[in-house]
Structures are given as C-alpha cells and as structure tokens.
Image (cartoon, rainbow, N blue to C red):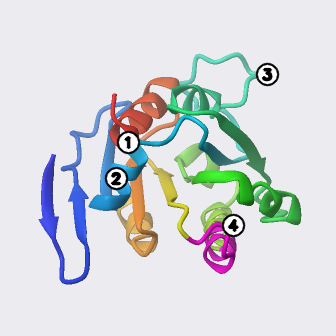
C-alpha cells in the first residue's frame, strides 16, 4: 500500500491488482477514514445496501441466495444487509437504517450481465448512492459516518464508470461479484 498526500486530505491508495477474477482495489480513501474503518468498535453496525440483480454468470452460489451475501459475511462487524430495487431507488425504509449505522456501504454493480438487461442500471444505482450519501450528510446523527462505494464492473467500461463515482470519498472496485471477489473487496477495505 502506498500513501499519497493531496492539498486537503491525506489519502491511502492501493495500486490496482492485475485484472483477474476476484481482484479488488482501494481506489481512494482518506487516511483517517481508512484507520477508522479498520478499527471499528464491535458495537458499530455496517449498513450494506446492495442492488437487486441476478447472480454473476460465474457464481457458484445457490440461486435462492442473495448474490451479495458473501460480502456481508466477509465484513468485520454486524451487518444490516438491505437490498434496493433499481426501479424504485431510495425509499424512506432505506433511510430508516441510517441512524444506527457506524459505516454505510453501497454497492453499484454494472457488469455486462446487468447492463445488457437494463441500460439504465448504472444511472439508477448512482442515483440511489447519491441519495443515501445526501441523507447521511444532512443528518446531525450520521454526518460523521463513512460512506463507502463498492463499484463492481468488468472491463473495459469499468474505467468510465469509475470516473463517474470519483466524488465519493471512499471507493473500492472489483471486477466481479463472485464470493471470492466480494471477500477480496472486504479485505482490501477493512484489512484481513
């Protein structure tokens, strides 16, 4: 892991892994947030918002299992796993989970198998992520809660999508949402 300084914040940056199935990269994260994430208090809850999408074609999970369940299991603390529908976006039910959160993690999944079924999938998920982030920032009780975006995209379109989410303070990318890829994404962010 290398560390870079910017004019306002110190950011931890991990160089991207070679593109193999299951690789994950920490694109950027303020150093103080990374330290906080890796030293979560045992009582802090991670609220995990995941899109309602079909399984990855290379997944070995049972079809009646949520494709992001392995991510929730890999996270280091108690997790509230809350799916969201792309066509409904953020609802008050989603916002209701925020006050108890120590960390908010939002998955945006835009692999070929999803984009081929719904060309608006990225825009819908980005709108959800921005809405949740706005709610976190507007509330006195959650304004200090880190918001993490996990971008799941296969190449080559992943580069342009990654640029579109650069304004989120914490960005992790992975090239698939198989159990191995999701476990690697959790390890990159929260440590082993």
Asked if the residues shown at circle 1 and circle 2 are in contact, with their CB atoms under 8 angstroms apart, the answer is yes
Answer with left or right where residue 22 lies relative to residue 102: left
Quickly name the residue at label 4.
128
Quickly name the residue at label 3.
64
Q: Earlier in the sequence, mark 3 or mark 2?
A: 2
Asked if the residues shown at circle 4 and circle 2 are in contact, with their CB atoms under 8 angstroms apart, the answer is no
The magenta segment is: 131-143
Q: How many marks?
A: 4
Mark nearer the viewer, 4 or 3: 4
Q: What number is the disc on residue 38?
A: 1
Q: Earlier in the sequence, mark 1 or mark 3?
A: 1
Q: Quadrant of the C terminus?
A: top left
Can the viewer see residue 156? no
CA gap, disc 4 and disc 3: 24 Å
CA gap, disc 1 and disc 2: 6 Å
> Residue, x 66% and y 75% (percent of image)?
140
Which corner quadrant of the image does residue 174 belong to?
A: top left
CA gap, disc 4 and disc 1: 26 Å
Q: Earlier in the sequence, mark 4 or mark 2?
A: 2
Relative to the observer, which residue lies in front, 43 or 112?
43
Q: Earlier in the sequence, mark 4 or mark 1?
A: 1
Q: Residue 134: x, y in percent? A: 64, 77
């Amino acid at each position: 892991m290398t560390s870079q300084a910017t004019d306002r914040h110190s950011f931890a940056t991990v160089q991207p892994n070679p593109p193999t199935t299951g690789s994950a990269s920490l694109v950027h994260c303020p150093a103080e947030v990374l330290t906080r994430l890796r030293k979560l208090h045992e009582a802090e809850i991670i609220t995990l918002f995941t899109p309602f999408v079909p399984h990855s074609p290379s997944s070995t999970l049972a079809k009646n299992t949520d494709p992001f369940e392995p991510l929730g299991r890999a996270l280091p603390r108690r997790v509230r796993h809350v799916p969201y529908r792309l066509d409904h976006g953020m609802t008050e039910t989603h916002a209701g989970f925020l006050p108890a959160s120590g960390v908010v993690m939002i998955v945006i999944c835009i692999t070929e198998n999803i984009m081929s079924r719904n060309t608006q999938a990225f825009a819908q998920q980005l709108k959800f992520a921005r809405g949740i982030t706005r709610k976190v920032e507007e509330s006195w009780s959650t304004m200090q809660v880190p918001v993490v975006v996990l971008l799941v995209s296969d190449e080559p379109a992943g580069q342009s999508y990654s640029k579109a989410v650069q304004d989120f303070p914490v960005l992790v990318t992975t090239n698939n949402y198989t159990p191995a890829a999701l476990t690697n994404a959790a390890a990159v962010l929260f440590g082993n």
